[in-house]
């Protein structure tokens, strides 16, 4: 997928973006970063968003270069600024918009989130989303994930779409070191032998996670008829069940699916009537389009998803971008975890992370005079919340490398009773800090698992 805007700005750098407006038109406001230190307990269908009620200018409003899809943001605000926190019931909003048109839903999404929302574009029929956004007349942004293994026709489609709408798609790329390690250890086509999850996680999921950390909402082309096994209950708007947004923590990202209730025929009727540029692979029998090695044409009587990862079970054909659609048992099976059995696909992989055995974590919990303090995550690799914080925790490990703080992980789903009894495990993930002077770990209390929040927690005890 890739981020785009509708002016002549260059590709995404993490510090500035183009917009779908001319220089004479009003521009979307820049949003300052404010950390919320406490939140009441809320249902998963609710989400916080902040709205300023003052005219105080943010301080130190300098751009910070990073890999997320984020606008220019202030790092602090003037003393005395009061942040008014509002709670939105997105489950109720989804019901209200259930019979709304895609154009109405798109307009609502762009109106509500302005420059903090972006369209995810894969170079397929989801170009309809860009056309709907264009028709609203509002500024909009588009991003895409370039996995490095897309068809040539898809790259040509990106170029045609940019020229047609006068936009610049903001591309996200996989980490070169991770790709190199995967290919060197397993070869270029390991997914044919051990499943597509690992490759998708490196080339798609982690880049998407970085992109979404700079947003408060994103727009996808999911439809209920695309994959009856995983997308039949997709709402038009929801709190994202897997990924985190700009504010960090569960409930910090909203996911809009404007065409959720639209059928494939209606989408194509719309594209043809509006003369929208489409991927030429569609005319060659490709319906659902992904990476070149994992996509093939389908026959007239086959479902569109049968052209994706055709060598695998048809029940759970998700690459991880929309993993929240999977039922619990399907998610477990997707990770190789059938009926509670352990999974072979691990997470939190980094040379700066120590994988602790049960003996290791027991020793750590007993030692009072440690050489270094430790921060340890208790996790289950199939847990979607653990997967969502993987990027942040690996980045934390990289930042703490050589600082005297050890970063570890302990797979607690295989020793759950022990972890609940001895390590304060309530749910996955649980994060513990083991000070040098004490054997008693300190439990991280917040649901904000972005790297800055985790670093602040560590620094409080160093």
Image (spheres, helix red, strand yellow):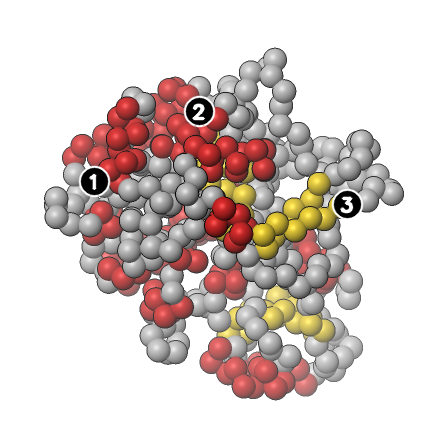
Q: In which quarter of the image is the N terminus?
A: top left
Q: Foreground: 389 or 435?
A: 389
Marks 3 and 1, how far apart in space? 49 Å
CB-based contact (under 8 Å), mark 2 and mark 1: no
Q: Which of marks 3 and 2 is in front?
A: 2
Q: Residue at x 70, y 61 (%)?
A: 40
Q: Are marks 3 and 1 in contact (CB under 8 Å)?
A: no
**Which residue corresponds to the image point at 52% horizontal and 77% vertical from the top-left?**
412
Neighbour class for label 3 at 10 Å: few (<14), some, many (≥20)? some
Q: Position of residue 425 (x, y in %)?
A: 60, 77
Q: What is the x, y in percent for residue 246?
A: 61, 46
Residue receiving disc 1: 286
The residue depicted at 44 percent of the width and 68 percent of the height is 382
Which residue does the numbered mark 2 point to in the structure image? 135
Write down the residue under mark 3: 83
Residue 442 placement: quadrant: bottom right
- In the displayed structure, 139 sits above or below 196; it is above
Question: Which residue is nearer to you in this view: 30 or 390?
Answer: 30
**Camera-nearest label, 2 or 1:** 2
Nearest-to-viewer mark from 3 and 1: 3
Please give the name of the residue rendered at 52% of the width and 53% of the height, measured from the top-left corner.
91
The local crowd at label 2, few if under 14, some if 14 to 19, many if 20 or more residues have their Cα within 10 Å, is few
**Could you say which quadrant of the image residue 401 lies in?**
bottom right
């Amino acid at each position: 997928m890739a981020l785009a805007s509708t002016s002549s700005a260059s590709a995404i750098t993490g510090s500035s973006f183009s917009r779908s407006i001319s220089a004479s038109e009003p521009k979307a406001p820049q949003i300052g970063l404010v950390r919320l230190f406490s939140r009441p307990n809320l249902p998963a269908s609710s989400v916080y968003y902040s709205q300023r009620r003052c005219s105080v200018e943010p301080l130190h409003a300098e751009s910070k270069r990073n890999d997320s899809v984020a606008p220019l943001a202030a790092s602090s605000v003037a003393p005395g600024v009061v942040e008014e926190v509002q709670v939105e019931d997105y489950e109720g909003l989804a019901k209200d918009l259930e019979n709304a048109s895609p154009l109405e839903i798109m307009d609502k999404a762009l109106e509500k989130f302005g420059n903090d929302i972006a369209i995810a574009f894969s170079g397929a029929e989801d170009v309809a989303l860009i056309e709907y956004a264009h028709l609203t007349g509002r500024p909009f942004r588009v991003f895409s994930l370039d996995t490095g293994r897309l068809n040539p026709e898809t790259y040509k489609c990106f170029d045609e779409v940019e020229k047609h709408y006068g936009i610049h798609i903001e591309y996200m790329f996989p980490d070169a070191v991770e790709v190199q390690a995967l290919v060197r250890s397993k070869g270029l086509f390991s997914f044919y032998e051990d499943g597509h999850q690992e490759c998708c996680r490196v080339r798609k999921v982690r880049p998407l996670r970085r992109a979404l950390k700079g947003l408060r909402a994103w727009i996808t082309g999911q439809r209920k008829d695309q994959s009856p096994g995983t997308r039949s209950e997709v709402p038009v708007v929801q709190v994202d069940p897997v990924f985190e947004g700009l504010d960090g923590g569960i409930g910090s990202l909203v996911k809009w699916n404007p065409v959720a209730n639209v059928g494939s025929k209606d989408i194509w009727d719309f594209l043809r009537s509006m003369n929208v540029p489409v991927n030429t692979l569609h005319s060659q029998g490709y319906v659902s389009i992904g990476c070149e090695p994992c996509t093939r044409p389908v026959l007239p009587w086959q479902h569109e998803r049968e052209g994706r990862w055709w060598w695998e079970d048809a029940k759970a054909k998700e690459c991880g971008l929309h993993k929240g659609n999977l039922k619990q048992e399907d998610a477990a099976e997707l990770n190789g975890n059938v009926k509670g059995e352990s999974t072979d696909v691990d997470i939190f992989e980094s040379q700066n992370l120590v994988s602790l055995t049960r003996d290791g974590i027991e020793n750590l919990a007993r030692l009072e005079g440690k050489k270094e303090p430790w921060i340890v995550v208790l996790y289950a690799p199939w847990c979607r919340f653990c997967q969502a914080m993987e990027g942040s925790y690996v980045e934390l490990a990289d930042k703490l490398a050589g600082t005297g703080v050890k970063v570890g992980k302990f797979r607690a789903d295989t020793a759950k009773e022990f972890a609940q009894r001895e390590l304060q495990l309530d749910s996955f993930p649980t994060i513990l800090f083991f000070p040098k002077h004490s054997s008693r770990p300190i439990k991280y209390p917040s649901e904000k698992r972005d790297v800055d929040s985790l670093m602040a927690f560590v620094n409080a005890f160093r």
